[in-house]
Image: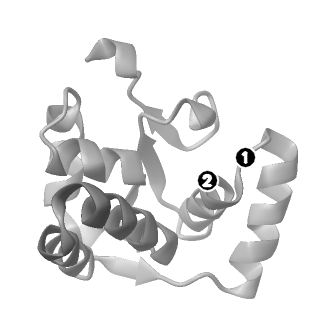
Amino acid sequence: MTLVDTCGWIEWLADGALADRFQPYLEETEALVVPTVVQYELYKWLERNRGEEAAMKAVARTTRSRVVDLDTSTALLAAELSRDHGLSFADAVIYASARRQEADLVTSDDHFEGLPGVTYFPKKEA
């Protein structure tokens, strides 16, 4: 299982410099885990930058994967991970969701660099 962070979805959908790095993960929809917080961030960014139709299409695409809600166990794990690694709320929920689903987190967000279970693509690679 794989969880692609919001930045990876945006890179891929916007054909950014790292789009090719994220593409193989995002094409395997049956192996993807998508936390609802990623849906939120993705919709918010796309609606603001590409319009509501593009945002709705992207969110619809995420529903082909395993969408996971924020439950109590994940919230408590996120709080611990936030404390231990200095992660923001959204980053902690995303990382906790990956851990709870036994998924590899794939990202270019440097807040996750070096954490266990993370595949990190530096933006300077682009």
Residue 46, position as x, y percentages in the image:
26, 61
Name the amino acid type tagged 1: Leu
Disc ID at residue 48 = none
On the picture, is 48 further left or further right than 57?
right
Residue 36, position as x, y percentages in the image:
47, 77
Residue 90, position as x, y percentages in the image:
61, 60
Q: Residue at 18% across / 37% down in the picture?
A: 19
Image quadrant of residue 110? top right
**Viewer-proximal residue among 94 and 46:** 46
Q: Can I make out residue 58 in this image?
A: yes
Q: Can I make out residue 32 in this image?
A: no
Disc ID at residue 91 = 2
Colour basis: one colour
Q: Residues within 10 Å of mark 2 (few under 14, many from 20)?
A: many
Separation (CA) of disc 1 from disc 2: 6 Å
**Viewer-proximal residue among 86 and 2:** 86
Image vertical order of residue 3 relative to residue 20, above or below? below
The C terminus sits in image quarter:
top left
Q: Which residue is mark 1?
A: 87
The N terminus sits in image quarter:
bottom left
On the picture, is 51 further left or further right than 10?
left
Q: Secondary structure at mark 1?
A: loop
Q: Residue at 43% across / 63% down in the picture?
A: 41
Image quadrant of residue 97? bottom right
Name the amino acid type tagged 2: Asp
Badges 1 and 2: C-beta atoms under 8 Å apart?
A: yes
Q: Residue at 19% across / 46% down in the picture?
A: 12
